[in-house]
Image: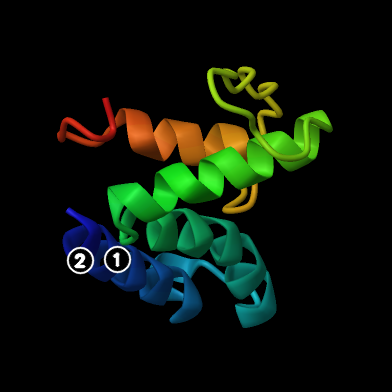
Amino acid sequence: DHDTLQDEFEQLKRVYSNNLEGLIIPENIVDGEAAVVEGVIALMGQSTEQLIEDFSIVTCESSGIGVMGNGQKLPMPPTTCKWNRADPNTILRVLCYRDDNAAN
């Protein structure tokens, strides 16, 4: 899915960058808005194991836990309503849409 999403997003970005259909949007605005989406698409291209590791690290850092001990559970990250590749909630959402046992 990652490759397809990346290709389709690049095509969509070109539509806005090429001023088709009378749209006049400066390229720097298109690139700025696209950066968030590109970060999330990059997360989708990572392995499940890497996402789980990244999720654990950023969740611990954002909650102030530090290093996880044996038997300790990760807290649910807060919902920030802002997609960001370094946001624990965004990483969790990407993991939730995986169709493999490790992600579950």
**What number of labels is visible?**
2
Out of 96 and 68, give the one closest to the viewer: 68
Query: Marks 1 and 2, Cα distance to the nearest angstrom?
Result: 5 Å
Out of 47 and 74, give the one closest to the viewer: 74
Cβ–Cβ under 8 Å for marks 1 and 2: yes
Out of 76 and 64, give the one closest to the viewer: 64
Q: Amino acid at mark 1?
A: Gln
Q: Is residue 3 left or right of residue 19?
A: left
Residue 36 x/y as whole percent: 58, 57
Write the residue at 52% across / 61% down: 39
The label on residue 6 is: 1
**Residue occupied by mark 2:** 3
Residue 101 x/y as whole percent: 17, 30
Residue 35 x/y as whole percent: 58, 66
Q: What is the quadrant of residue 95 in the picture?
A: top left
Q: Quadrant of the C terminus?
A: top left
- Quick one: which residue is furthest to the front in this view? 70
Q: Secondary structure at mark 2?
A: helix
Task: Answer above or below: position of 38 versus 14.
Answer: above
- Quick one: which residue is furthest to the right in this view? 64
